[in-house]
Image: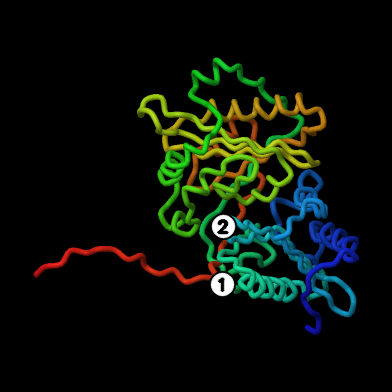
Amino acid sequence: MSGRVRLARLTDLAALGELSRLSQQEHVDARSLGLPVSGPRIGVFSLFRLPLGAFRPNDLLFVYEDERRISGLLRVERDASRDEMTIVELDAIGSGDSGDTRYRLVQHLLRDGTKRGAFRFHVACADGQGNVELFMQAGFARYGQEWLLFRGAGMKLPHAWPDEKTRSAGIRPCQPLDALPLARLYASVTPQPVMRLESYRLSDWERQGSTTRVPRSSLAPILRFADVEAYVQEAQDDGPGVLSALLQVGVAREEQPHYLKILARPGADVDPIVDFGLGLIGARIERGGSCPDNGVLAPVRTYESPIDRRLEEAGFASLVTVTLLMKEAVVRVAEPALVPAVR
């Protein structure tokens, strides 16, 4: 291939928008991450659009150009607080060359991102169009899967909970002091290999709110276009300081679905917090006026079942299963520890 990878320019915007749109259609020569699904109801182009005002200084947008024609696009979001990069969009179109185009874009990102100080690279993709094979060939490790569930806009949302009912259920807004209980809640749910890879710190758990990325999900990039709130549910019978669930709600400001994420201790009853979260979204839509009702998306890790069953009982339906992959640009070393010695 004679083309080259370069940073995108303002003059590329029209071509990038068209390439992004075409790659989401069922085109034999087009490839994308397939997240979450192609089709008129929800598509990647509608979820992860390219408004320049949403770009931040650390974000990157690369294109593949061959004979003055743009045939590939890679868009990356940078979390500067954790030195991580997330591939949001990876599109290519072209007869027979789309796979090679995407591979060259990924390789360029890994080289460029490492120079910029990124330690981890994340991506979520549907297991199709050679996506998983492409990233594993580039050195990514598959560490989990998520079910994406969707509750349609035509379904009536429940009423918002009154304050007295909310307090009696032990639900309250999340605070920075909840960092340690949240870390313990996460540890009670998440397998040890995933915990080691995601490597969250207490400072990460303190940032619950408008800029949250913890716990990570495949839909985290859409939170940039939403007003995010975080709530916790205190365990009623396990003493003070113990949490049974975390709820993240993202109310969309753009033409996209709202966001609902639940992390719950095994055996906890999540029906109340699901109903509370949906009622909160309904109240924000009514109060905001400009917030459209485009349905609600909820990501659930496969090891977090039966949360998916409770969501289905609340009107959600499964859309697709996506694969989570990560590549570390640093080498892990064993932490020093004291060991007993015998004289």
In the image, 150: left or right of 140? Answer: right
Q: Quadrant of residue 229?
A: top right
SS for tag 1? loop
In the image, 336: left or right of 261? Answer: left
| Residue at horizontal 52 percent and vertical 43 percent from the top | 206
SS for tag 2? loop
| In this rendering, the label closer to the viewer, 2 or 1 | 2
The residue positioned farthest toward the bottom in the image shown: 2
Viewer-closest of 296 and 30 = 296
The location of residue 171, given as percent across then percent down, is 52, 26
Q: Quadrant of residue 164?
A: top right
Q: Amino acid at mark 2?
A: Arg
Viewer-closest of 28 and 139 = 139
Look at the image and tell me in which quarter the N terminus lies: bottom right
Looking at the image, residue 258 lies above or below residue 49: above
Is residue 239 shown to the viewer in this render?
yes
Name the residue tied to disc 1. Answer: 139
Distance (Cα) linking label 2 and label 1: 20 Å
Q: Amino acid at mark 1?
A: Gly
The location of residue 183, given as percent across then percent down, is 44, 44
| Residue at horizontal 66 percent and vertical 22 percent from the top | 158
Name the residue tied to disc 2. Answer: 82
Say which label, 2 or 1, has the lower sequence index.
Answer: 2
The residue positioned farthest toward the left in the image shown: 343
Looking at the image, residue 104 lies above or below residue 24: below
Viewer-closest of 35 and 291 = 291
